[in-house]
Image (cartoon, rainbow, N blue to C red):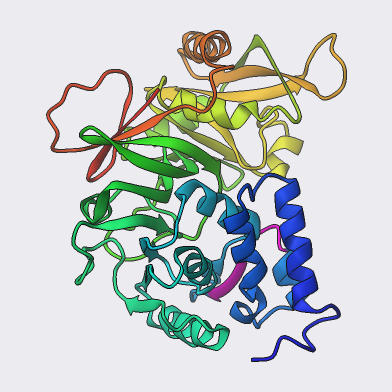
Amino acid sequence: MSETGVGTEAPDVLRKRMVANLRARGAIASDEVADAFLTVPRHLFAPEVSATEVYAASEAVFIKYDSRGKPVSSISAPWLQARMLEAAGVAPGMRVLEVGSGGCNAALLAELVGEEGSVTSVDIDPDITARARTFLGEAGYSQVQVQQADGAQPLPGAPEGGFDRIIVTVGAADLVPAWVDQLAADGRLVVPLRFRGLSRTIAFAREEDHLRSDTLIRSGFVSIQGGSAHAPRSVRLAGRDVRLVVDENQEADADALVEAFAGPRHERWTGVELGEQEGLLPRLEVWLAGAVAPYGRLRATQEAAERGLIGWVLERGMPAAWDHGSLAYLTLRSAPHADSGRYELGIISHGPDREQLASRLSDAVVRFDREARNEGEPVVRAHRRDNDKVLHGVTVDKPSTRLTIA
């Protein structure tokens, strides 16, 4: 397929601009990943939209929706693809498994592994695999093996010794055994994992008898389909306007929490401040998931804020904790006696034990500020559920994996 006559600017010009922007924002750090992005004709994998939109996209380009209008497949935003590839550390000659086929990412992987390597891309949806196979052929990457299969199940014909890299491009609720079992001894697994209501793309490497993270990327993906799919529970605290997201089957008495939320609220301010560009809140959210239990996420509409139902809650939600019939969540306010662009973290709580619960969550925030604020990303470790090793601290139980966060 010719690259001429697509949009108002030539695709090669758009690609160069995209790579320059990705380098400037730090998403691309290596020449190898830059060369892959400069080579792959990204627009061929999303003919539904203009080339200008494909190369400039700051979010995913959705390519299929279900009967309810919910997206079930997409081409990830360039910055996210770049960061995942950098975290994976794909090198020439490697054997790579991609779970979730859009075609474009598989082409980037093919560039990185070169002629001596191999890329296998699987998806449970036959429409998606047919589409990926067609577009990969048109773009010159017919060497990519595209298979229709449940990517959470063992892949027949996996290479002896496992895949050097496994990259999952759909949101997962668990680290399924197939990925761990088919990962080479020195391999790396990059997976968008949901835990405690959070979504983070995590790069794991083996450490003794478990996996240890070394990269966490805040991101969102369409959810995995098939037998490993698992949706969190939502407790509606005020109709559709305010809800508590409860993951991993944590106990939550919906009736008691609804009653608590309708009652008086208590505010407690921590004295912990953050700046607009500091990037502190995403790290705090993950750290709290390993320090507080039960733990989830409070989400609210703009209407809820306008009606005064909640404190200042960001659009993507805020960390929340609960205990029997009481509930507490993080909130923000402009920092007192500080320049604009500084904010103070606080706690709003409801229920009979609201003051004690607010104090417990506040103490955790202060402890993070004192002990972990300047220590970089939290570390997520993944152990098999059947491992009888004693684990310390808060654990997050998935169907086949037990997570700890430090």
Q: Quadrant of the N terminus?
A: bottom right
Specify whether residue 321 is in view: no
Q: Quadrant of the C terminus?
A: top left
Q: Find residue 384 and report its image quarter.
A: top left
Left or right of 300 on screen, residue 320: left
Rendering coords of residue 272 (x, y %): 66, 12
In this view, the residue in front, 298 or 365, is: 365
Does the magenta run of residues contain 380?
no
Q: How many marks?
A: 0
Does the magenta run of residues contain 63?
yes
Rendering coords of residue 101 (x, y %): 44, 71
Q: Find residue 41 and report its image quarter.
A: bottom right
Magenta residues, start to end: 57-64
Rendering coords of residue 235 (x, y %): 45, 41
Q: Is residue 388 above or below residue 401?
A: above
Q: Is residue 16 above or below residue 29?
A: below
In this view, the residue in front, 328 or 20, is: 20
Which residue is rendered at x = 48% and y = 65% of the image? 109
Rendering coords of residue 258 (x, y %): 48, 33
Specify whether residue 258 is in view: yes
In this view, the residue in front, 174 or 216, is: 216
Which residue is rendered at x = 45% and y = 79% of the image? 128
Left or right of 182 on screen, residue 393: right
Q: Is residue 337 above or below residue 257?
A: above
Which residue is rendered at x = 76% and y = 56% of the image? 20
Which residue is rendered at x = 29% and y = 73% of the image? 149
